[in-house]
Image (tube, rainbow, N blue to C red):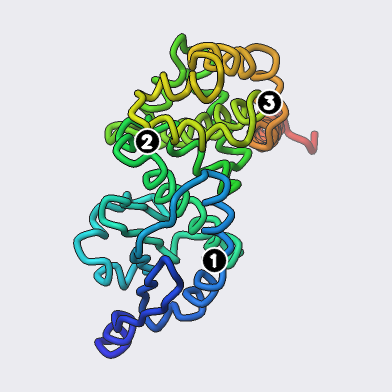
Amino acid sequence: MILPLLLALAAVSTEAPPYHVVHPASLSREAEQIAGSIPVVVEKLSRALNAPVLPPSTLYLVSRDSTELAGEAGDAMPEWAAGVAMPWSHTVIIRADRVGSWRQRELTGVLAHETAHMLMAAAAGAGADLMPPWFREGVASNLARDGEWLDFFYLWVSPIPSSGRPLDDLSAGFSAGASPVMTRAAYAGSYSFVRHALDVHSATLPGRVLEGLRAGLDFEAAWRAAAGMPLYEDESAWSASIRGRTRWAAILTSSATLWLIITLLVLLAWLIKKRRGSRVMEGWTEEDPFE
């Protein structure tokens, strides 16, 4: 029991600039996959964000039994997260045991998401702290091509589409006290709003916003300079697009709704069958079938 644990915790390192990948020997195959993806991921994201070269950073690839490799940095990782980026300490942590069955694809997606956070912070410079949570997560999710249909279902059934200030609600969904449902809705909403802004303006919008932050503008001024219109106008247009018929059509045609309807139909059939069975039994107790 002790020997396998010691082997799992034995640190192995792989150089894949700008990352120094640290992992247990048990994750050597996953580390090789990530190391092979790093050059392409970093190059594409850097170009998309017009970001400077990342400084040397450490990427911890760990699992449930080897989180100690990341030291105190591992404590900053939420229980539900597959990855976390800490640009101020040049550190990324990825939990290999929290990704899906398509290991290489999922690992590469988490790598891209967290690397996007690192590059955004580098591109914004001293203005990095001015980025609202929805912008950070929305840009990273779009670049990493995240977004599942069920996440959007959480968005459409949440209070966010009916809100007068949906972007504020998205940011609140990332706070420590937010419910898991609202957090999922916040991720989906952030992805959706940034996707809307990219479609309306251009794919260079995030990079231009980051450039404005680096130049000393506040976030709304940086957005106006990059988009050519105030943030609240984009917010209003996006909010209208996820309300009304579009929202209910999405809810009614979603896979989650389909499975809910199937479940209710099965339950209804069971209740009808049970009631019919009860009536048959009552008939047998009320009369003698052999008379």
Q: Residue at x 55, y 56 (%)?
A: 109
Residue carrying label 1: 39
Q: Position of residue 182 (x, y in %)?
A: 42, 30
38 left or right of 173 in image:
right
Q: Residues within 10 Å of mark 3 (few under 14, many from 20)?
A: some
Q: Position of residue 104 (x, y in %)?
A: 58, 67
**Residue nearest the observer in this picture, 88 or 224:** 224
Q: Position of residue 152 (x, y in %)?
A: 58, 33
Q: Residues within 10 Å of mark 1 (few under 14, many from 20)?
A: some
Residue carrying label 2: 214
Q: Amino acid at mark 3?
A: Ala
Residue carrying label 3: 250
Q: Nearer the viewer, mark 1 or mark 2?
A: 2
Q: Residue at x 36, y 60 (%)?
A: 55
Q: Amino acid at mark 2?
A: Arg
The relative height of residue 241 versus residue 131 in the rendered view (above or below) is above
Quarter occupied by residue 103: bottom right
Helix, strand or loop at mark 2:
helix
Q: Nearer the viewer, mark 3 or mark 1?
A: 1
Numbered-mark total: 3
